[in-house]
Image (cartoon, rainbow, N blue to C red):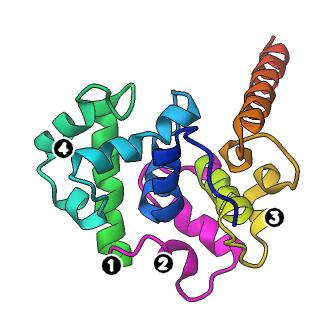
């Protein structure tokens, strides 16, 4: 397994490396902001929760107090208040459906890649694309490679690609992913005309 380098911050990346919850929360936050800022969000929560990132603690936290914690500068996201609700909803779902065991989502009963994708898509805040990207991240960088994971992850599972956070292993690869996304946006605009 490679050491994660997504947040481009050694302490935040160490937390992402050691905590499946941190990694999942980073993926949840990865929208409408730069990915390295999104994946820094779990470290901010970890620090504000007294050096502990626990699914039960977050699930049970007073919603107003948690929103304040998430919005305190530097906020966990550009939309800190709405993302605080999403973070809590995700943690509450994991507690109720997965007994608080984050890794069970991709390990319980030895699921196939298609089943892991289905489980990820069922998570609050995870649609088809986010679920595929996270499945690719698990496969490419965490060694979680159930049968058929590349196919289930679609283009994000392609070896050697640079299209998502699943492919960020260094500062250079982050720039390659940014270039790919920029080119894809330009191509999409051209086809819309």
Packing grade of label 1 (10 A; few <14, some 14-19, many >=20) is few
Q: Is residue 38 above or below residue 132?
A: above
- First in sequence, mark 4 or 1: give its number: 4
Q: Name the mark on residue 151.
A: 3
Q: Name the mark on residue 66.
A: 4
Q: Position of residue 166 (x, y in %)?
A: 69, 50
Packing grade of label 2 (10 A; few <14, some 14-19, many >=20) is some
Q: CA distance from mark 4 to mark 1?
A: 21 Å
What element does badge 1 sit on?
loop
On the rendered image, what quadrant is the C terminus found in? top right
User: Which residue occupies 69% across, 70% down?
Assistant: 143
Q: CA distance from mark 4 to mark 2?
A: 25 Å
Packing grade of label 4 (10 A; few <14, some 14-19, many >=20) is many
On the rendered image, what quadrant is the N terminus found in? bottom right
Q: CA distance from mark 1 to mark 2?
A: 9 Å
Q: Name the mark on residue 166.
A: none
What element does badge 2 sit on?
helix
Residue to which mark 2 is pinned? 104
Q: Are marks 1 and 3 in contact (CB under 8 Å)?
A: no
Q: Which residues are magenta?
A: 100-129
């Amino acid at each position: 397994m490679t050491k994660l380098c997504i947040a481009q911050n050694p302490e935040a990346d160490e937390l992402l490396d050691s905590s499946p919850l941190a990694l999942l929360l980073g993926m949840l936050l990865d929208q409408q902001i730069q990915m390295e800022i999104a994946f820094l969000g779990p470290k901010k929560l970890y620090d504000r929760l007294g050096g502990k990132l626990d699914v039960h603690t977050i699930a049970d936290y007073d919603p107003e107090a948690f929103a304040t914690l998430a919005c305190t500068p530097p906020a966990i996201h550009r939309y800190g208040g709405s993302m605080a609700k999403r973070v809590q909803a995700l943690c509450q779902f994991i507690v109720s459906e997965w007994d608080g065991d984050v890794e069970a989502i991709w390990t319980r009963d030895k699921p196939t890649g298609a089943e892991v994708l289905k489980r990820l898509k069922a998570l609050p805040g995870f649609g088809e694309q986010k679920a595929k990207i996270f499945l690719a991240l698990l496969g490419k960088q965490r060694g979680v490679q159930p049968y058929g994971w590349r196919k289930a992850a679609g283009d994000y599972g392609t070896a050697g690609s640079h299209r998502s956070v699943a492919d960020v292993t260094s500062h250079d690869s982050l720039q390659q992913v940014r270039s790919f996304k920029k080119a894809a946006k330009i191509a999409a605009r051209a086809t819309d005309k």
